[in-house]
Image: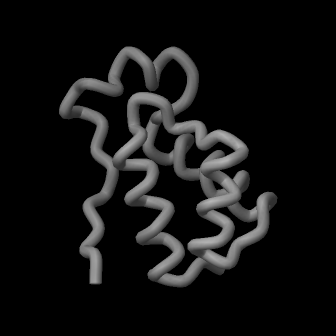
Amino acid sequence: MFSDSQRTILLEWLRDHRSNPYPTIAEKKQLMNETGLNREQINVWFTNNRIRLGMTGSHAARHASKAQMRVPQVAVC
């Protein structure tokens, strides 16, 4: 469903914002422009990936600074 380049952009954003993995409306608009995805696709991707990576609720806040939280590294081409 998502291309490699779209996943790379979104994963990089998530990695850079792991202490608060919830993009603002302005950040979502920027991600929409960069990826070509619509707002719903962006929302679903972030919801799913926060769950997959254990970045939801107070759990995320407690572990944001710990090395245990591993956001997949992506190569930038």
Decide if residue 54 is on the left or right side of residue 26: left
Residue ID at (30%, 36%): 69
Image quadrant holding the C terminus, namely bottom left
Decide if residue 27 is on the left or right side of residue 62: right
Residue 25 found in image quarter: top right
Question: Tell me, what colour scheme is on the image?
Answer: one colour
Residue ID at (65%, 46%): 47
Q: Is residue 49 above or below residue 39?
A: above
Residue 43: % across, % down: 72, 52
Residue ID at (60%, 75%): 35
Depth check: give the residue in front, 48 or 7: 7
Residue 20: % across, % down: 48, 30
Image quadrant holding the N terminus, namely bottom right
How many badges with numbers are in the image? 0
Decide if residue 72 is on the left or right side of residue 3: left
Residue 18: % across, % down: 40, 37
Residue 73: % across, % down: 26, 61
Residue 19 found in image quarter: top left
Q: Is residue 15 above or below residue 3?
A: above
Decide if residue 62 is on the left or right side of residue 10: left
Depth check: give the residue in front, 55 or 21: 21
Depth check: give the residue in front, 22 or 57: 22
